[in-house]
Image: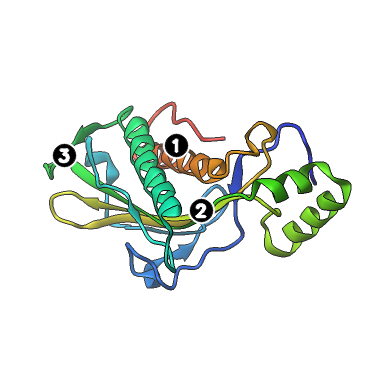
Amino acid sequence: MIQLGGCSATFQARNADIKDSVLVNPAILEKGGDDQALYRYINPKASLKQYTKVMIDPVLVRKDGELDKETLDNFQKLANNAYFYLREELRKDYVIVSSPEPGAMKVQMAIVDADSSKPVRNTLSTFVPVGIALSVVKYGVTGKQAGVGEITAEMKLTDASTGQLLAAAVDRRVGGKVLTELWSSWYNADEALKFWAKQLTYNLCSMRGGANCVKPE
């Protein structure tokens, strides 16, 4: 189960808390299947083929409990990075606009929770045999290896002009163990943001019947 080489930076968690959803009413969300967000909603009456432009809102952040300055700064960096990753991926297929226009959809994203990895414990559970055993046990119980970061995020797509809900999703990803990045405590969370940006672009491509859609690894 534990491999020291070629480990994925992040993988999907087994569950996510949706009862306090920030962007969308959790009552409309359904459990996703393979290669989908943990919870999702697709408007059956909406057609994504009509959209050629996208407006990306600043990424929101919510963390239960008080945040010290360092943690708040890290969350702001994650939000800034998330916006950048979304923009860089979506601009491959859409014209980026800054205000509502006909033929534009709006993308909203919220980082609901995130935790950094714990470098000392992460190194312990990667290199020390006893630690590896403990890491395997924890993964079996919780779906999250010991000492790795995690992040939960929500995303909502609406018609930029009318506000019609097109799609929504809630997903949670937890860190794998990439040896070269063990001491970058927010690496796992940042890699999850990159993945979600690529996944959104891929899903939009697939839903509009596009060619050469690139599935994220």
* Tag shown at residue 98: 3
Taking the spot 66% from the left edge, 31% from the top edge, the residue there is 180
- Residue type pointed to by label 3: Ser
Taking the spot 68% from the left edge, 63% from the top edge, the residue there is 142
Give the distance between the C-alpha atoms of the residues marked 2 and 3, in whole angstroms. Answer: 27 Å
Residue 213's spot in the image, x, y percent? 44, 31
Residue 79's spot in the image, x, y percent? 37, 46
Tell me whether circle 2 and circle 1 mark residues in contact (CB < 8 Å): no
Within the image, what quadrant is residue 6 found in?
Answer: top right
Tell me whether circle 2 and circle 3 mark residues in contact (CB < 8 Å): no
Q: Dot 3, crowdedness within 10 Å: few (<14), some or many (≥20)?
A: few
Q: Is residue 200 left or right of residue 58?
A: right
Give whichever of 14, 176 is nearer the camera. Answer: 176
- Residue type pointed to by label 1: Lys
Q: Element under label 3? A: loop
Q: Is residue 96 above or below residue 102?
A: above
